[in-house]
Image (cartoon, rainbow, N blue to C red):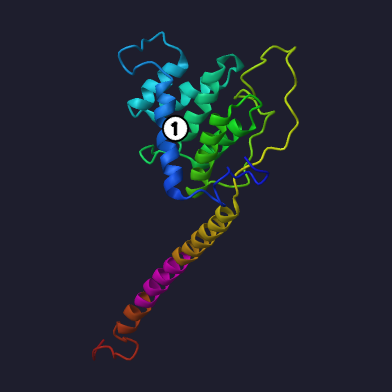
Amino acid sequence: MTRSGVHPGWPGRPPRRRVVSILVATVVALQGCGTALGRYFSPGSEPYDKGVLRLSEGDFSAADSAFRETASRCESGGRGRKALLFLALLHLDPRNGGAVPDTAALMAGRVLELPDASPEDRIQAEALYVSALDRGADPDLRPDRSAPGLAPRFEWCAEAGPPLPDREVTYPDAKGARAFRGLREQRDSLAGQNRKLTRTITELQAELERIRKLLRLPDTSTVRPPRGS
């Protein structure tokens, strides 16, 4: 990966077809690391195994919980890294009604910031990160290493292990994503203004109709009372 954070051979942001191809390869590679789905899983399986099974069944919420449990323990090792990739992946799946692109970007970012991530992990994380940006994720979001919940590493788990390296992590180029996000924010702002104007017009039309009805009422102020009264 170059200093700009872009994989060699990718001028700027990777073309969408390359990203999609890598995402497909990611799914195949990750699922190939587990045992065969369904037949070999039992209630006593590891959280990672349960996550793969639940994801294959389309239960995104249960899969999210299982993968988070795996990624919360340094002792999960390689499965912890793959759990982070799966978390990014399921938050990009259009079938997931609870998908959050910001979460996908953060999970991919966590892999990019792991001191023990392999080159293959980083390539997959880059593709997932760029896809999250295409879905509207905030390009300025970065994982908080000090925040509890997810492990900052999956090797050297003992306290005597080497400290986390204080290094600058390069992310794929996000200039286009920032411009796209700005346009979306402008669109949302204009849509909000349009809704307010629509409500105001509706209220004014109702008031105008009320005034018209009042003007159509007969004028009884000049009607004389009957004789003899």
Q: Which residues are magenta?
A: 196-209
- 191 to 106, vertically: above or below: below
Q: Residue at x 75, y 12 (%)?
A: 160
Q: Quadrant of the C terminus?
A: bottom left
**Residue 206 shown in magenta:** yes
Q: Residue at x 36, y 12 (%)?
A: 41
Asked if residue 18 lies left or right of residue 157, the reply is left
- 106 to 183, vertically: above or below: above
The answer to whether one can see residue 33 in this image is: yes
Q: Quadrant of the N terminus?
A: top right
Q: Quadrant of residue 76?
A: top right
Q: Main secondary structure of the magenta part?
A: helix
- 187 to 117, vertically: above or below: below
Extreme residue toward the front, this view:
9
Q: Amino acid at mark 1?
A: Thr
Circle 1 sits on which residue?
A: 26
